[in-house]
């Protein structure tokens, strides 16, 4: 037995069958190094605990679940938490976004331009740790904080330190800053990839993976506002460098525009199975046909989509479900756990299905969507969306050891866990019910608390930092940023975004 082995004993283990049905069995799970090597009843009865594993975790009364996969997240935004609770997309674009320009000039990255590389490190670390706390073991990070090579390096460094599994999606078109806050004025836009960003992307591609293999390099690139030759060059370069995942936002509305990202990519010959589109709000039926044909994928983020008028989350659309997954988007705006996204996605889809029946004075005979379907969106379908279905997303022998343990006897989960463990997780669980999180065979949350992280030379000491120390760094950074934010003019910034995006003010209305 190696020195890095974990035995999860006497738990209720959730296993997927070949049809993606989830079954609960009483079993033990043995992990050696970073792999699941056995799932069976009675492993714990074979001998003394010290001979079975280095660490034995008694899971009596607990649910052993696959780690959740978050397929769309801007992890650097921690210091901005709390300021978007009543914001729509237009508000968010100037208060905290790093979105690229939706037309021909850069906008929507006003507050982010105040972040220095050190702010980015602590924001990214805080975002990763919050994700782990909520049971997310794999995240697709849209790293749009690429104001400089140092900003991206800090974000990547924090991702490695956190212990999370990640696709670090490098934003290849750096962000335009703010030249002046009073009066408000954007800097010159980037309409092509500068040499330093191309060089850094190539360097990172050659060095990946990072963090003992947990962190892979992806590319984030929103293609719909640049010339065809630039778009084609970026995609072809990324693929030649060995990048396996390319992400893009995909929204059709009065703010983002009515273009079809799917059709644009397809017309350029770029639509392939390594593409993951965030939101896919209002995509056309013909777009769905193209996405399915190329085995491209979609990430729904119910919290932001429902709040910011993107449209109803598409993950339960019959023509998109099999290629869909769930993401958090902005933890500055909402919670960073997939549990919340599951519940919102499921109930909003049920509500949309029920509405026509109610309008006609009738009720449907059966419920529209099941807890198992949404559980799969947060686990195995998410794994497939990032091309890792054979490695993560379910508990099975040979897969990477990304596992979450829930307290099935907590006040919220008791009795539900005994009746239907999947329903207990989807409908009743919260972050407080997550006792243990294992990522790549290492315990990152134990007994309900995050394990300290090693930030190395950044703090000039070898002692790992617990969450209280990380929180103190975040609060200090937030205070500095807030002082700078207050020096700006919010109204001027909003008008600058409207102008830069070419938004028709007649489409921004109080009432229909």
Image (cartoon, rainbow, N blue to C red):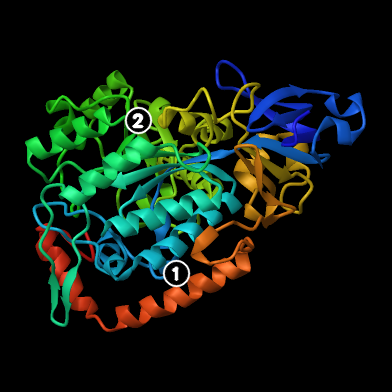
Residue beneath label 1, please? 82
Q: How many marks?
A: 2
| Residue 176 badge | none
Relative depth, front residue between 198 and 94? 198
Which residue corresponds to the image point at 47% horizontal and 51% vertical from the top-left? 159
Q: Nearer the viewer, mark 2 or mark 1?
A: 2
Give coordinates of residue 61: x percent, y percent. 81, 41
* Residue 496 in which image quadrant: bottom left
| Residue 244 badge | 2
Q: Is residue 312 visible?
A: no
Circle 2 packing at 10 Å, graded few (<14), some (14-19), many (20+), is: some
Q: Is residue 225 visible?
A: yes
Assign the N terminus to one quadrant of the image: top right
Which residue corresponds to the image point at 16% horizontal and 65% vertical from the top-left? 497
* Residue 508 in which image quadrant: bottom left
Give coordinates of residue 472: x percent, y percent. 55, 73
* Residue 145 in which image quadrant: bottom left
Kind of element beneath mark 1: loop
The answer to whether 484 is drawn above or below residue 335 in the figure is: below
């Amino acid at each position: 037995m190696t020195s890095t082995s974990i035995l999860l004993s006497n738990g209720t283990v959730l296993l997927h069958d070949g049809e993606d049905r989830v079954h609960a069995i009483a079993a033990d799970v043995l992990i050696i190094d970073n792999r699941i090597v056995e799932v069976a009843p009675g492993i714990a009865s074979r001998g003394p605990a010290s001979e079975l594993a280095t660490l034995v975790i008694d899971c009596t009364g607990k649910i052993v679940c696959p780690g959740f996969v978050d397929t769309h997240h801007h992890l650097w935004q921690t210091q901005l938490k709390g300021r978007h609770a009543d914001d729509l997309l237009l508000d968010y674009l100037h208060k905290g976004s790093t979105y690229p320009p939706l037309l021909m000039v850069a906008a929507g990255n006003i507050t982010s331009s105040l972040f220095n590389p050190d702010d980015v490190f602590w924001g990214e670390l805080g975002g990763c740790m919050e994700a782990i706390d909520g049971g997310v073991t794999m995240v697709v990070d849209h790293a749009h904080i690429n104001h400089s090579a140092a900003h991206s390096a800090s974000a990547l460094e924090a991702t490695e330190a956190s212990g999370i599994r990640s696709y670090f999606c490098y934003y290849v078109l750096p962000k335009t800053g703010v030249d002046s806050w009073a009066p408000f004025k954007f800097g010159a836009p980037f309409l092509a990839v500068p040499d330093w960003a191309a060089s850094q992307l190539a360097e990172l591609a050659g060095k990946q993976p990072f963090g003992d293999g947990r962190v892979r390099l992806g590319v984030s690139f929103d293609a719909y506002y640049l010339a065809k030759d630039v778009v084609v060059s970026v995609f072809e370069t990324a693929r030649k460098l060995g990048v396996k995942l390319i992400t893009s936002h995909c929204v059709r509305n009065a703010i983002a525009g009515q273009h079809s990202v799917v059709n644009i990519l397809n017309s350029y010959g770029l639509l392939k199975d390594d593409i993951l589109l965030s939101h896919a709000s209002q995509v056309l039926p013909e777009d769905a046909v193209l996405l399915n044909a190329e085995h491209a994928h979609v990430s729904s983020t119910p919290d932001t989509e429902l709040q910011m008028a993107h449209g109803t989350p598409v993950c339960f659309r019959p023509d998109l479900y099999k290629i869909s997954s769930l993401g958090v988007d902005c933890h500055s705006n909402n919670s960073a756990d997939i549990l919340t996204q599951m519940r919102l996605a499921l109930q909003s889809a049920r509500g949309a299905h029920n509405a026509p029946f109610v309008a006609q004075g009738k009720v449907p005979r059966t419920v529209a969507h099941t807890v198992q379907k949404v559980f799969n969106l947060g686990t195995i379908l998410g794994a497939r969306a990032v091309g890792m279905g054979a490695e993560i997303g379910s508990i099975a022998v040979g897969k990477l050891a990304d596992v979450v343990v829930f307290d099935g006897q907590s006040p919220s989960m008791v009795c539900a866990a005994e009746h239907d463990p999947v329903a207990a997780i989807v409908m009743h669980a919260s972050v407080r019910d997550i006792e243990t999180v294992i990522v790549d065979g290492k315990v990152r949350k134990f007994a309900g608390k995050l394990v300290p992280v090693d930030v190395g030379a950044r703090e000039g000491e070898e002692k790992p930092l617990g969450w209280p120390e990380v929180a103190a760094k975040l609060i200090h950074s937030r205070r500095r940023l807030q002082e700078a934010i207050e020096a700006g003019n919010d109204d001027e910034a909003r008008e600058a975004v409207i102008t830069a995006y070419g938004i028709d003010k007649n489409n921004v209305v109080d009432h229909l």
